[in-house]
Amino acid sequence: MAKEFAKALYNSSTWRTRIRPAVLARCRYICETPGCFNPAEEVDHIIELTPENIRDPKIAYDLSNLQGLCSACHKAKTKSEIESRKTGSLLAPVYFSPDGEVVVK
């Protein structure tokens, strides 16, 4: 579920009619987690949205910061991010770009 500060973004016409469909079409509606071939149902911000960065278009709307994920992978990624914040983990999350490049957050 969207955080309160982000609801306006996710309900915007730009998100619903342009950004979200573009991300899902780019990944051909297949989860972008390596090795997962489930249908992509959610669009995830690789660099997590915060109240401080939500107005930055490079974070909120740039397709290079967005990935299509299945619900299970999105929940696992979110849980991992929450755990990292709780434990103060020094390990940066690692993701793969659409062209297979390693991206360290």
Image: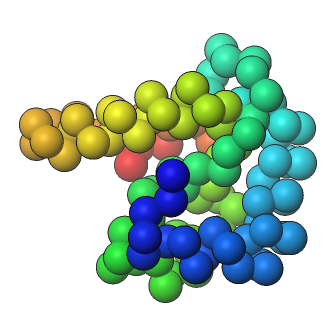
Q: Say if 80 sits above or below 21 in the image.
A: above
Query: What percent of the width, then of the height, locates residue 69?
Result: 65, 37
Q: Is residue 8 left or right of residue 63?
A: left
The answer to whether residue 61 shows anywhere in this view is no
Q: Say if 66 sits above or below 52 in the image.
A: above
Nearest to the observer: residue 103 or residue 63: 63
Q: Is residue 68 left or right of residue 77?
A: right
Query: What percent of the width, then of the height, locates residue 57?
Result: 58, 80
Q: Which residue appears farthest toward the bottom when viewing the image? A: 55
Which residue is depicted at the point 75% across and 18% down? 37
Residue 70 picture quarter: top right
Q: Which residue appears farthest toward the left when viewing the image? A: 87
Q: Is residue 99 left or right of residue 22?
A: left
Nearest to the observer: residue 91 or residue 52: 52
The answer to whether residue 13 shows anywhere in this view is yes
Residue 35 picture quarter: top right
Query: What percent of the width, then of the height, locates residue 43?
Result: 66, 50
Nearest to the observer: residue 35 or residue 83: 83
Q: How many marks?
A: 0
Q: Say if 20 sits above or below 102 in the image.
A: below
Query: What percent of the width, then of the height, locates residue 79?
Result: 35, 34
Which residue is depicted at the point 84% across and 59% down? 22
Which residue is depicted at the point 75% across and 21% down? 38
Q: Which color scheme does this rendered protein use?
A: rainbow
Which residue is depicted at the point 39% across and 49% down? 105
Q: Which residue appears farthest toward the top when viewing the image? A: 35
